[in-house]
Image (cartoon, rainbow, N blue to C red):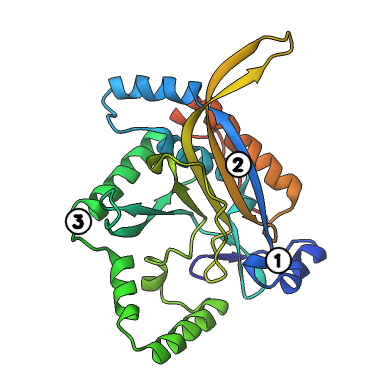
Amino acid sequence: MKEGRRLKSLNPFASIVPYIMVERSDSQNTITDCFDISGAEKLVRKLRTEGYDSIGILHIMLAAYVRAISQRPAVNRFIRGQKIYARNGIVINMAVKRKMSLDGEETTIKLKCDPSDTLIDIYHKFNKLLEENIGEEDSSNGTDLAAAIIGHIPGLIKKWVIWFLKLLDYFGLIPSAVLNVSPFHGSMFITSMASLNIPPIRHHLYNFGNVPVFIAFGAKRAELVLNEDGSVTKRRVVDFVANLDERICDGYYYASTLKMFKKYLVSPEGLLEPPAEVVEDVR
């Protein structure tokens, strides 16, 4: 399998769940949370003085999720043909606008990471990817080209082409060239509402492809917190919403992963060093 290896040691119940909840839309759970950004903003200010001029909250969120996968690899699984697979590598998809305007074109980029990547590694990889894909308003990448080709096919034939792609996807036969540009295949999809200055949306998971997690985060906002002694503290937070495919792992595992993800969002200094150990998924 191009994207991963089939897991054969899972308990019987886990192996039959994808047959009961066949579509990803049948099996998505949603959680809403927020995190205090004081630690992230402090680190961002420090790194900017060291020359990482464009580093921001988004880079920290990407690095925190990669680090969570390095320790909780089951969230990097995917469903293919009602079977559960462990993904090879980490692929994060993100939709970006080439120009922040109503008529600005949107494209999708695919960030490929290693479990041992640090925040600085991801900063360089992500910024290089942005430069390659949104440097020019009229530029296009592989995703745009694939969409343009399918978009110019007559309607009835287009419907057949999409059906055929879904059939190939079910059996894991989609060519690597298509997988490399598909926004529907990857470890996670992330979208930022911060640049729009709105709260995060509750975005659905796609039935086509195999992305098991969709995270949306919103603009920074102020929040008043009631302390145990009755005093009130003002803090700045970012809200995020995660949609999760419950078939790839159980709720306890997801909860542990999200707690680790949030821990690195609140205290991101640990992301500057690679993990002491990368945990492998079961066989």
Q: Quadrant of residue 20?
A: bottom right
Q: Give above or below for 51 relative to 86.
A: above
Q: Mark 3 = which residue?
A: 137
**Cα gap from disc 3 to disc 1, whole angstroms:** 47 Å
Closer to the camera in the image, 151 or 275: 151
10 Å neighbourhood of mark 3: few (<14), some, or many (≥20)?
few
Q: For mark 1, give the secondary structure.
A: loop
Whole-percent x and y of residue 240?
55, 41
- Secondary element under disc 2, as helix, strand or loop, is helix
Residue at horizontal 38 percent and vertical 65 percent from the top: 180
Q: Which residue is mark 1?
A: 8
Kindly report which numbered mark, 3 or 2, lies closer to the viewer in this rendering: 3
Q: Amino acid at mark 3?
A: Glu
Q: Residue at x 72, y 10 (%)?
A: 230
Picture quadrant where residue 36 is located: top right
- Identified by mark 1, the residue type is Lys
Q: Amino acid at mark 2?
A: Gln
